[in-house]
Image (cartoon, grey):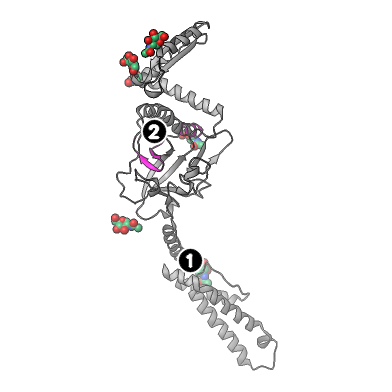
Amino acid sequence: MTRISAEIGKSPKKHQHIEYSQRSLFSPICFYSPKLPIFILVTCVTLFILLNIRFSLQTPPSFPTFSLPWTLMSQWQNAIFNSTITSTNYANELNSAYLYKLHQSVTFLPLKDLRYAHAALNGHTWFMSSMYDTHQEGDVHFQQFPSQSSQGRLLCLKGKDTHDGSWNSYALAWPEALPHNATFMKGLTFVSYNHYNYENLWHGLSAMVPFVAWHKNNNCSLPTRWVLYHWGELRFKMGLWVKTMMEATFGGPLNIEGFDEIDENMPACFEKAVVMRHNEGGMSRERRMEVYDLLRCNARIYCNVSLKDRSNEIGMTLFMRTGPRSFKNETIVTEIFYKECAKVEGCRLMVAHSNNLSFCEQVKCLLI
Ligand SMILES: *[C@@H]1O[C@H](CO)[C@@H](O)[C@H](O)[C@H]1NC(C)=O
Ligand SMILES: *[C@@H]1O[C@H](CO)[C@@H](O)[C@H](O)[C@H]1NC(C)=O
Ligand SMILES: *[C@@H]1O[C@H](CO)[C@@H](O)[C@H](O)[C@H]1NC(C)=O
Ligand SMILES: *[C@@H]1O[C@H](CO)[C@@H](O)[C@H](O)[C@H]1NC(C)=O
Ligand SMILES: *[C@@H]1O[C@H](CO)[C@@H](O)[C@H](O)[C@H]1NC(C)=O
Ligand SMILES: *[C@@H]1O[C@H](CO)[C@@H](O)[C@H](O)[C@H]1NC(C)=O
């Protein structure tokens, strides 16, 4: 491989030699000066032929650096090519030299870019900060690999660190030239960035919503695995409620990737990956409603709950929380809502404590 690149490096110089000899061959000295002895002409021609033979032997066929209207010369050239190196062989060698360089050129950048710590959630964010999202008006912001905007390159991650996201890194690589010792992970991978956490119902769910939107827009493709990051640090679980919601949506247990099989600092490259780092950002109200409808529908199916016709009823459910954000006096709040509900025909109020209800109890709650 070094040999070929060295030759490629040398060829421009030889090219200059050839041009020089071409000039001398067609110069008046060779053709338009009848007074010159014939041996000068012969010398010119011989020199030219020798130079061309040397050139032909050393210059790869795919770099045709000169063309002469001299059929004899081109025949010699072909003969020499055919007897030395076939173009297929050469293409293979060139290819492998090229691929070797591509392997070497894969550059890993920190997953969490501290330069953008002051604007961690804006634009390209501090997560995979060199990448830009794809965004259609009113729809979800996302990145997809491979894609046209990645020039067909796959996403690779060295991303096992759970304490400092700037120690984790990412790179793009062509499938033929994955970085050394890379583990190729087949199927579709959802890579999620969450600025808050995956436990809280709201923060967890809003990190999931864009994946549901993408799934809906992409033929209901199902993820093979999930890679969860918080500030670029790897996470292994979601809160039970969020996880159940996603299991209901994607029709089965989630495979949350921990990269257990992969050594520290070794890359994993994904056959297909979708990255989300803006939660619901960019989605219009209509798009969000569609996604939440889908979530509700899937939750009902998952919990074996069917929707009855309640077109002339108004259901109202008051979910109480515990801790610092709970109401100081639940009785008073409940009474206020009861009174207001009673003023409207068909209104039915229900009060529940979501912290001690199972997922499906909550789904049923909303239907009573
Ligand atoms: C060189 O080889 C190719 C394929 O084998 C053939 O088509 C071509 O005519 C050859 N050239 C010469 C000058 O023999
Ligand atoms: C690839 O893995 C082998 C064996 O674990 C190791 O010796 C080698 O240094 C690794 N190569 C790179 C580029 O990390
Ligand atoms: C959607 O899925 C169907 C059936 O699996 C397949 O034939 C079609 O090509 C897919 N379309 C896209 C855009 O992936
Ligand atoms: C829903 O029904 C199916 C079959 O009737 C059952 O296997 C499943 O456990 C039920 N799911 C729940 C959450 O009750
Ligand atoms: C809540 O308010 C009601 C009515 O004012 C009162 O009777 C009750 O003691 C209060 N409960 C608490 C825990 O403060
Ligand atoms: C649920 O929790 C609330 C407050 O934490 C409590 O008042 C209620 O009795 C509990 N319900 C059940 C069914 O355990």
The three-letter code of the residue at mark 2 reads Tyr
Q: Tell me the quarter of the image containing the N terminus.
A: bottom left
Whichever of labels 2 and 1 marks the residue nearer the N terminus, that label is: 1
> How many marks on residues?
2
Q: Characterize the local packing of mark 2: few (<14), some (14-19) or many (20 or more) Cα atoms within 10 angstroms.
A: many
Front one among 10 and 87: 10
Boundaries of the magenta span: 211-238
Establish if 346 lies above or below 170. Answer: above
Picture quarter with the C terminus: top left
Judged left or right of residue 33, residue 270 is left
Q: Amino acid at mark 1?
A: Ser
Q: Is residue 19 above or below residue 264?
A: below
Q: Is residue 95 left or right of residue 16?
A: left
Query: Which residue is at the front of the view, 357 or 298?
Result: 357
Left/right of residue 226 with respect to residue 47 in the rendered view: left
Label 1 C-beta lies within 8 Å of the nearest ligand 1 atom: no
327 sits to left or right of 346:
left
Is residue 343 placed above or below 282 in the rendered structure? above
Residue on which the image places disc 2 = 198
